[in-house]
């Protein structure tokens, strides 16, 4: 279906034409007419299927209809016109709220609103953490029609009195399943309570777990349902493969792979933030230019890393799963799963960063012995086997094969509670209280051995056969217990 046939207002049809878009993607063709009707919608679609335009275009269309006629066809001005002294126009209320799990995804949604609404007078802004709130509060004070926000910073500014959600007409949850995975559910509930009950609600999610369906029943009213490109179906143009490798040789294998493979932009996924930093340091020692992006990095550092990665001489970008969604960068040729993800669906999101906009890409995974179970989960989800590359001599895995889910590392080597650590069971000795004396068997006869304390220590001495246990032994036993 062509965009011109979707019923969008002229400013948005013109903006889409300026971008060179002619044919709508399946999620856009199905979702846009439903949203324009004012109905609630729950959509299941992966990142990379064009779902951002599926809700931003009709959302802007609905917002411009409620503007005064004198402003509907007004061209957006690069700068706000000056106001006479003593006059302060009443700021516009926030009429659309888009919630996003990550800063990068929020920034991309904001960029989409700028592109699609460039021929209108609609205003929008983005609020997220990791940066100063000064400019965000300044933009809010002038008034915006649409607000894109991450839940944490939104609640913070609400508590400070900078944001009022009482006039919201359209509420959008983007990547709802990821927001639940990141623990945002309590924040989302507090936000929903501040939004009018009579509203249009749109919920987009890459997967449909039971928790998402329960929230849809609670927050949406008789929603229409659209499902396109299930998360278990990666792009056909992605060549996937796996290397079986020893965990301690993964860094060396990565260096070898990057040096021997003709490649363009390369994105490496690590399971942990510390692991990402470790990979970057190792690559830099080996002469590769690399940078990291994860939750412990400031927003300025994350923006700089992404800007370099989009540049002419991109470094190897090492990221945690915050980059698995919402990272829309063209010409990413290779994805390397340095660590396999613990959730199978995340694998599909990761490799979806390549083979975008009709291009081709490669996805390579490093799998050690205790990750075999994660590999099986991924293959079951996609209903296909991932080809295994020939094992490289000297890189063979030595860990025991674990075909079950990966167990999270805890306190140690099989002991209970704090008595066990990474080096195995540790004898618990409480300060100030002697431990129970060890019993020593006599060389002959029956009976148990008694213990005498000397100098604060505990020694074991054999008791003659047939000797009766004294009351002192019982006292020592109670003291030790």
Image (spheres, grey):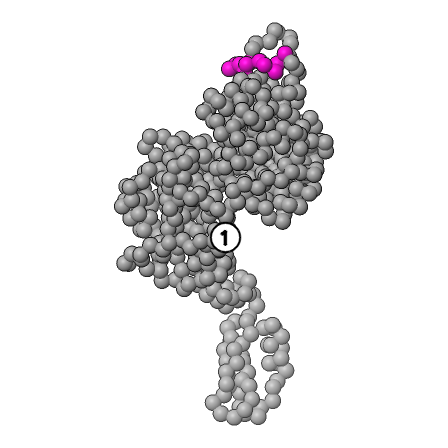
Residue 177 at what x, y percent from top left? 57, 43
- At a point 44% along the width and 51% down the height, the residue shown is 340
Q: Which quadrant would residue 85 be assigned to in this image? A: top right
Query: Which residue is at 28% across, 58% downward?
Result: 394
Magenta span contains residue 315: no
What quarter of the picture does the C terminus occupy? bottom right
Q: Which residue is mark 1?
A: 381
Q: Residue at x 67, y 38 (%)?
A: 223
Query: Closer to the camera, 294 or 310?
Result: 310
Quarter occupied by residue 54? top right
Q: Which residues are magenta?
A: 70-80
The quarter holding residue 258 reads top left
The residue that appears at 66% across and 20% down in the rendered structure is: 66
**Does residue 155 sit above or below 438 in this rendering?**
above
Mark 1 neighbour class, 10 Å CA radius: few under 14, some 14 to 19, many 20 or more = some
Residue lying furthest right: 197
Determine whether, in the image, residue 71 is placed left or right of residue 358.
right
The answer to whether one can see residue 176 in this image is: yes
- Badge 1 marks a residue whose secondary structure is helix
* Residue 193 at x, y percent in the picture: 70, 36
Image vertical order of residue 295 relative to residue 35, above or below: below
In the image, 305 versus 6, the foreground residue is 6
Q: Which residue is situated farthest in the top direction here?
A: 84
Query: What is the chief secondary structure element of the magenta stretch?
Result: loop
Residue sitting nearer the eye, 471 or 96: 96
Can you say whether 1 is above or below 120 in the image?
A: below
Percent x, y of residue 313: 32, 32
Vertical placement of 119 versus 297: above or below? above
Residue 72 drawn in magenta = yes
Residue 285 place in picture, x, y as percent: 30, 43
For residue 183, say whether it is visible. Answer: no
- Left or right of 217: which side holds 277? left
């Amino acid at each position: 279906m062509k965009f011109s046939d979707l019923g969008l207002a002229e400013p948005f049809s013109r903006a889409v034409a300026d971008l060179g878009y002619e044919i709508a993607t399946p999620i856009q063709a199905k979702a846009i007419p439903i949203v324009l009707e004012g109905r609630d919608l729950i959509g299941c679609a992966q990142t990379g299927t064009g779902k951002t335009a599926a809700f931003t275009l009709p959302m802007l269309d609905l917002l411009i209809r409620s503007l005064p006629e004198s402003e509907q066809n007004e061209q957006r001005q690069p700068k706000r016109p000056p106001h006479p002294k003593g006059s302060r126009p009443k700021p516009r209320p926030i009429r659309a709220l888009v919630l996003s799990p990550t800063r990068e995804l929020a920034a991309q949604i904001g960029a989409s609103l700028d592109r699609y609404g460039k021929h209108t007078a609609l205003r929008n802004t983005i609020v997220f953490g990791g940066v100063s709130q000064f400019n965000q509060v300044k933009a809010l004070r002038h008034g915006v029609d649409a607000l894109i926000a991450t839940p944490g910073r939104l609640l913070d500014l609400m508590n400070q009195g900078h944001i009022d959600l009482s006039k919201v007409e359209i509420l959008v949850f983007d990547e709802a399943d990821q927001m639940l995975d990141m623990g945002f559910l309590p924040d989302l509930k507090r936000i929903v309570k501040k939004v009018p009950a009579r509203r249009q609600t749109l919920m987009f999610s890459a997967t449909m777990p039971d928790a998402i369906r329960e929230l849809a029943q609670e927050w949406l009213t008789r929603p229409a349902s659209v499902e396109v490109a299930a998360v278990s179906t990666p792009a056909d143009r992605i060549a996937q493969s796996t290397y079986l490798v020893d965990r301690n040789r993964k860094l060396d294998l990565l260096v070898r792979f990057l040096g021997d493979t003709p490649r363009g932009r390369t994105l490496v996924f690590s399971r942990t933030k510390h692991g990402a930093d470790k990979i970057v340091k190792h690559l830099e020692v080996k002469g590769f230019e690399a940078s990291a992006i994860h939750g412990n990095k400031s927003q300025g550092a994350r923006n700089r890393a992404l800007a370099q990665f989009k540049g002419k001489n991109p470094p190897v970008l090492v990221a945690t799963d915050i980059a698995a969604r919402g990272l829309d960068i063209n010409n990413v040729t290779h994805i390397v799963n340095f660590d396999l993800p613990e959730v199978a669906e995340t694998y599909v999101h990761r490799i979806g960063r390549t083979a975008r906009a009709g291009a081709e890409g490669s996805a390579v995974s490093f799998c050690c012995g205790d990750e075999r179970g994660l590999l099986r989960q991924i293959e079951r989800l996609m209903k296909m086997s991932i080809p295994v590359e020939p094992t490289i001599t000297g890189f063979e895995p030595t860990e025991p094969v674990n075909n079950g889910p990966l167990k999270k590392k805890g306190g140690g080597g099989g002991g209970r509670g704090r008595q066990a650590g990474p080096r195995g069971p540790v004898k618990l000795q409480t300060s100030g209280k002697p431990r129970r004396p060890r019993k020593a068997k006599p060389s002959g006869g029956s009976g148990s051995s008694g213990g005498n304390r000397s100098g604060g220590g505990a020694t074991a001495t054999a008791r003659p056969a047939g000797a009766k246990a004294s009351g002192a032994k019982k006292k020592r036993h109670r003291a030790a217990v």
